[in-house]
Amino acid sequence: MIRSLLIASLSIATLAACAAPDDGGPATSSGAIESPAGKEARALMALVDECSAGAPARAVTDLCVLSHDAMEGRLVGTPGNALAREYIISRFQQIGLAPLGDSFEHPFSFQRRIDFRNPGSPRETIDAVNLIARISGADSSRVMAVTAHYDHVGPGETNEIYNGADDNASGVAGLLAVAEHFMMNPPAHDVLIIAFDAEEGGLNGARHFVDNRPDGIGEVVFNLNLDMLGYSPDGDIWAAGSYHTPGLLPIIEAAADRASVTLKAGYDFPTGDPREDWTLLSDHGPFHMAGIAFLYIGVEDHEHYHQPSDEFGIIDLAFFSGVVDLVVDVAGRADAALSEIAVMDGRGEDG
Ligand SMILES: [Zn+2]
């Protein structure tokens, strides 16, 4: 199923303007021809309408929009990736988040092999954009970074769209729910809400953030990373990271007691097999390498992982909603415990 949408960069002002009720027609009220940006904004609004039919929970709408064919698999540097970014920024604004610095958008570039399967391939420079918001807490000296990557792997060679519903529209939806929670329940410490770009193929957004910590923030002492929250045939969700920082176990245990899904701790024992040790497999990896404690919340590898079949229809909405509640709970507990986490050793056994 490929829907063709001409996608251009949207201005937020246009998007906001299009959020106002209108007559639903393509022309402006003055009868003038609508601008291309206006058309694109209208296309994004149509996605929201389509995805919010039946009034699902907001996180489900977010997941549906971000995994829509119109996002074309959100590959870094593509118009579909830019459209996903525009949607996330519009949600940041709707939630009332403040940008970190002058803008939510923190651009960077990185090098990658033109043919990623070939180690001898020449390299190209790719432009990417992390999105960062800050929620101020009473204590700004220590910071928790809540993270989820919004990029995915784009269309395949046959132009089949890899929608990345579980990986990682689901995590971004969870990230937005955490942001909403902290806007309604102000945190004790500063919280950064970060939607990373270019996770696929090298954790580039997280690497850039960790290596170039933005000015004006306190010490980042904990990373809660969300990646794949929506599909688990056995109903389990995993928290990795407490092997390295055993002091985080009480947070996992308390959250597990309250959760409607089965939360298990693991996949962080250094076996040397990345299928068994997820310590460096997603954006929490660079935080861990910098000695920062982390918890990664995600499901086990599954048959839809990095397949075109990872689309909205496979998401178990009851499971996903339970996981969203869980990650909000974990985030709240981590904020409350942040001064204790700050003195824990983020590298633990392998440090
Ligand atoms: Zn992912």
Image (cartoon, rainbow, N blue to C red):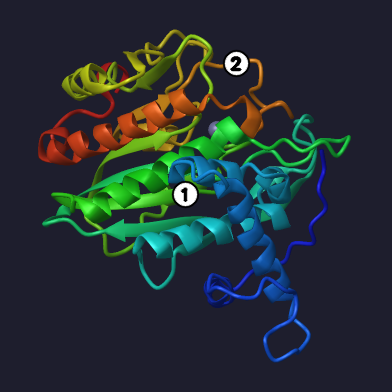
Q: Which residue is mark 1?
A: 195
Specify the quadrant of the image occupied by residue 94: bottom left
* Number of disc labels: 2
Residue 322 x/y as whole percent: 37, 27
Q: Residues within 10 Å of mark 1 (few under 14, many from 20)?
A: many
The residue at 75%/74% (across/down) is 26
Q: Is residue 301 left or right of residue 174?
A: right
Ligand 1 - quadrant of the structure image: top right
Image: 292 above or below 277: below
State the mark number for residue 208: none
Residue farthest right in this picture: 158
The quarter of the image holding the N terminus is top right
> Circle 1 — which element?
strand
Residue 221 x/y as whole percent: 23, 41
Image: 27 above or below 126: below
Q: Is mark 2 within 8 Å of ligand 1?
A: no
Q: Amino acid at mark 1?
A: Ala
The residue at 33%/33% (across/down) is 325
Q: Is residue 332 left or right of residue 16?
A: left
The residue lying toward the viewer, choosing from 293 and 139, is: 139
Mark 1 or 2, closer to the camera: 2
Q: Amino acid at mark 2?
A: His
Specify the quadrant of the image occupied by residue 77: bottom right
